[in-house]
Image (cartoon, rainbow, N blue to C red):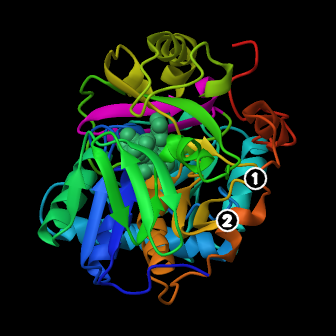
Amino acid sequence: MATATSNGRHIVVVGGGIIGCSTAYHLLTAGAKKVTLLEAGKAGKATTGAGAGFVSHWSAGMIPLGEEGAKLQQYGLDFYRMLHELGTEIGYRPNGTLIMALTEQGRDDFVMPVLNSPHAPKEMQDLNAAQIGEKMGGLVDPARVHSGAYNPHGIQVDTTLSLGVILKEIDRLGGEVREDTRVLSIKDEGGKVTLETSNGPIEADGVVVAAGAWNNEILAGLGWKLPMLRVVATRVVTDNRGLPSTLPTIQCRELRLWLRETFGAVMWGTGSHYTPLHRMQQSEIEPGQPHNDGLMQSMVDEQMERLQTVFPPLQGSKVSSWAQGIPCYTPDVGLFVGPVPGSENVVVVGGDNESGVTHGPGLGRLATEIVLDTERFVDPTRFRVDRYQRDAFASEAEIEDSMPAWSARHGARRFASAAE
Ligand SMILES: Cc1cc2nc3c(=O)[nH]c(=O)nc-3n(C[C@H](O)[C@H](O)[C@H](O)COP(=O)(O)OP(=O)(O)OC[C@H]3O[C@@H](n4cnc5c(N)ncnc54)[C@H](O)[C@@H]3O)c2cc1C
């Protein structure tokens, strides 16, 4: 198997989102002497810049990633605490995560699997409506909710601020970040890898491709394809509602909602308006963020009335900013990290399933260990790239059809309905 066994060799990372930046950081801390990160636009300005910054133990009843996922999640929690302790503001709030139900049925479907998960930390708490009301300091109307699973270890971060600190660390450790440098193709010639870029060719001994929603564009030239469903996800931030910075993040699958406080305002998004790119008029997009204001506006128009009943501070609120990104879902809701079949000196990492802020630090470390061929801190077998054949799915529509709904009992589709 792979790869660049000597730390003295040149490793190139493609993509300056959380996963690529984390990879460059870990390569440098692992002792790699020459690390170059190539970013088509500006680092952190694509999907990562739109991320909501929830980090928690999702293997506990939320994302089926098992023990290996739980280790990556714990690593992510530890990594952001370490970044916070460097002293620059990253919006780090160790306030916990609440998985909230509105009804008894919601509790059975979404809260009990969290409470009963073998991956739930022992400090996980079962809160009733009154306890939720108290903990959420006016953000939630307790008369409208049923109960919830509260993980006190969950945190929130600001993705843009976090990435700024990681980039500073990459610089301090001697790495080079080249922005406005798009990788056009990669050729793995055994001993050497040649990257054609918009600023000329670069040679490397090993390459890590971490180009998020653009991974398959790059892999196509290497004859490989990951089964990724690219989805446009929207977040909005209200005007300042005077909320304290001590509130836990909330997820409510009956509302298909995630919501948090950010610098006094409310940040939220709903899965019911997440829309697969292949269903949109413009089904390809240049590296960066989409800007579909119709999608954002329909989310606000269709959800706000209902949300205001559960979250009173939303009453009378305005949208002060919004952003969209393109997380990539996979048929098994798994992650990918490993050598590209047939191109041993190229490792790809992605398939983030909208959890790359959480898993990015651990994935970056794993990608580093694979490309440097050092001991893996987590067994990467379940994340291997060849668990699907390159032609396992003919289209993203086929991937979407193969994906489980949020709740078999409710038959709820994972994303916006085809008619939307
Ligand atoms: C609304 C929203 C909310 C979210 N909330 C959370 C959350 O609470 N918690 C969580 O864990 N995750 C969350 N996520 C998911 C998380 O943001 C993503 O999983 C993560 O940002 C993906 O990181 P990435 O590095 O793979 O992708 P990106 O950030 O997109 O980085 C890929 C980079 O590669 C560059 N690139 C592309 N092609 C090339 C090329 N040819 N050459 C060079 N560079 C190239 C792009 O410009 C881009 O900067 C959320 C996402 C969204 C959109």
Q: Nearer the viewer, residue 241 or 3?
A: 3
Looking at the picture, how far across and down is residue 341, in whole percent? 67, 65
Please report contact status of discs 2 and 1: CB closer than 8 Å, yes or no.
yes
**Looking at the image, is 373 positioned above or below residue 26?**
below
Which numbered disc covers residue 296? none
Name the residue carrying label 2. Answer: 341
Residue drawn at (37%, 87%) of the image:
6
Q: Nearer the viewer, residue 208 or 128?
A: 208
Looking at the picture, how far across and down is residue 196, in whole percent? 39, 48
Looking at the picture, how far across and down is residue 128, in whole percent? 59, 52
Name the residue carrying label 1. Answer: 390
Looking at the picture, how far across and down is residue 239, in whole percent? 27, 22
- Mark closer to the chain start, 2 or 1: 2
Secondary structure character of the magenta stretch overall: strand
Mark 2 residue element: loop
Q: Which residues are magenta?
A: 255-274
Q: Would you call the spot at circle 2 few (<14 residues within 10 Å), some (14-19), or many (20 or more)? A: some
